[in-house]
Image: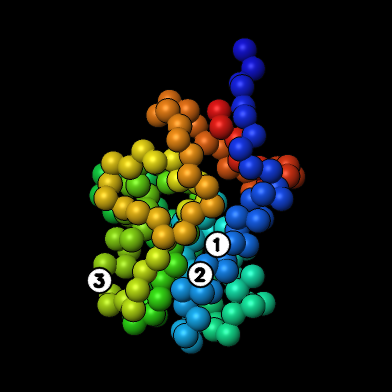
Amino acid sequence: MPEKKLLILNSQQIQQKIDRIAYQVLEDNFDEEEIMIAGILPRGNIIAERIKAILDEKAPFKSRLLNIDIDKQSTTLQAKTDFDIEDCRDKVIIIVDDVLNSGKTLAYGLGVFLNVPLKKIRSVILIDRNHKSFPVTTDFSGIALSTVIKEHVDVRLNETNEADAVYLI
């Protein structure tokens, strides 16, 4: 039996959401000299790269891209980063992921920065599903979806030469 999938966002709509989020990040950090944009692998970093590209063109501040690889199956924080956490001291951190479901991944992503003093930390989520089990909130989101728990949100970002899209399965 074929999967039924419902298109939630097409490529143009995804880009519009990312553009809007980038401008919100710009407005929230206009007086900063540098911000750190931390994308959670595998798709949060793609969204983070796109936000950074817009900010590099429009913002008066510098932005630096960071990647966080989280073991989402672990019951404790297991994360690898491509940066020295001390580089984030007294900086603004923008943590980016594609879908917020239970909040576990975002909570683990925030946990990476717990041992270093930060100026502020903000979260960016493309799709907020509203099924939080962890006390996390999003500062900037593309769209909030009310879904049932058994449904799945499939975010496609330049994968297998397909156009960007978000599907509800």
Which labelled disc corresponds to residue 115?
3
Q: Position of residue 23 (x, y in %)?
A: 57, 69
The answer to whether residue 21 is visible is yes
Q: Helix, strand, or loop for circle 1?
A: helix
The CA span between labels 2 and 3 is 24 Å
Which labelled disc corresponds to residue 37?
none
Q: Residue at x 34, y 82 (%)?
A: 90
Q: Is residue 24 above or below residue 163?
A: below
- Out of 139 and 108, give the one closest to the viewer: 139
Residue type pointed to by label 3: Asn
| Residue beneath disc 1 | 21
Q: Quadrant of the N terminus?
A: top right
Q: Is residue 32 above or below residue 65?
A: below
| Residue beneath disc 2 | 25
Total number of numbered discs in the rendering: 3
Q: Is residue 111 above or below residue 26?
A: above
The answer to whether residue 66 is visible is no
The CA span between labels 1 and 2 is 6 Å
Q: Is residue 74 above or below residue 119?
A: above
Q: Residues within 10 Å of mark 2 (few under 14, many from 20)?
A: many
Q: Residue at x 45, y 32 (%)?
A: 147
- Out of 63 and 14, give the one closest to the viewer: 14
Residue type pointed to by label 1: Ile
Q: Position of residue 38 (x, y in %)?
A: 46, 65
Comparing marks 2 and 3, which lies closer to the viewer?
2
